[in-house]
Amino acid sequence: MYDECNIVAITWARNEEDIIESFVRHNAPLVSRMVIILHRTEDSSLSILNKLREEGLNIEIRQDQSVAHRQSGALTDLMRELMVEEKPDWILPLDADEFLCGDLAGELKKVPAGQVVLLPWRTYIPTPDDDSCEISVLSRITHCRTEEIPQYYKILIPQSLASDPNAVIPLGCHRLCGVDASEYKEHGLSLAHFPVRSEKQLRNKILKGWESHLANPDRKPGEIYQWKELVGRCRDPKSISKDELRDIALDYAYKGETTTLKFSPICAEKSC
């Protein structure tokens, strides 16, 4: 952990039992603590997080039973709460399928005061050659895109902006809204992103997630378009083959014509 800074990671997650332990074990040592909001969780994610907390990892677990997918409101409210009660130096919104990579301590020293750090996605793709017997997502899925079109970013928010009452974390956490903030990209940090991992995980994510998104009265046209594109296929009971799963992952939030993959494994942690 970068001990000169107080960095709090905040997360809105749902049914992430296949990856949430790896997510916590990888990211927790890099930040001061993690606050994870579980939204209408139906799988073993809560049990896994409780075990990790009992083990001594610095995580706070909250639950949200609202029908709507209100990620923006929940994380914005949490950011404001933290700014009143703790005033951390940085707020880091992370999804449960995102893994921070790079020298956080060294890179934060270079960031000009008052700038939002943009963390680029590196999207990982399941392939037919992956070992289906390997439970750990990080050990199983080891290839990522060589390029991202478009390049999406997530945000790392400094205290000076997170404490602004007008600051809003929008759906997806790709930009900071409501404030006039410069953005910093000249660093070596990135987020390894694992949005598509298995047929079961994909169907669960898309069908339950899209239903909750439609229940949000504040939703805007075009939001989470990648979920909408997959609703029909995920409703179809026809099995999703390994080849099709790879193709779905290749197209997920990607607008290029073609892409290639490179072998770039993320170090996996032990299981509970």
Image (tube, helix red, strand yellow):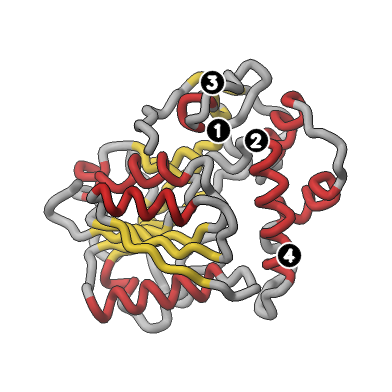
Q: Position of residue 135 (x, y in %)?
A: 51, 29
Which badge, 3 or 1, comes first in the chain's sequence?
1
Residue 265 as seen in the image, left or right of residue 14: left
Q: Find disc 4 in the rendering and name its residue.
A: 211
How packed is label 4: few (under 14 Cα within 10 Å), some, or many (20 or more)?
some
Task: Name the amino acid type tagged 4.
Answer: Glu
Q: Nearer the viewer, residue 150 or 155?
A: 155
Q: Position of residue 176 (x, y in %)?
A: 45, 67
Image-based side of 228 in relation to 171, left or right: right
Camera-side residue of 126 and 64: 64
Looking at the image, tell me whether mark 2 or mark 4 is earlier in sequence order: 2
Marks 4 and 1, how far apart in space? Answer: 25 Å
Query: What is the CA distance from the residue labelled 2 to the residue labelled 4?
Result: 20 Å
- Mark 1 Cα within 10 Å, few/some/many (few <14, many 20+)? many
Q: Amino acid at mark 3?
A: Lys
Q: Quadrant of the C terminus?
A: top left
Looking at the rendered structure, which numbered label has been put on residue 262? 3
The quarter of the picture where residue 90 lies is bottom left
Q: Amino acid at mark 1?
A: Tyr
The answer to whether residue 62 is seen in the rendering is yes
- Residue designated by label 2: 198
Q: Are marks 3 and 4 in contact (CB under 8 Å)?
A: no
Task: Say the numbered circle drawn on residue 124.
Answer: 1
Q: Are circles 1 and 2 on residues that touch, CB within 8 Å? A: no
How far across and down, in percent of the image, does residue 34 sit? Answer: 32, 58
Q: Is there any visible trace of residue 174 in the rendered image? A: no
Query: Which of labels 3 and 2 is toward the front?
Result: 2
Numbered disc 3: secondary structure: strand
Measured as percent of width and height from the top left, residue 113 is found at 24, 62
SS at circle 1: loop
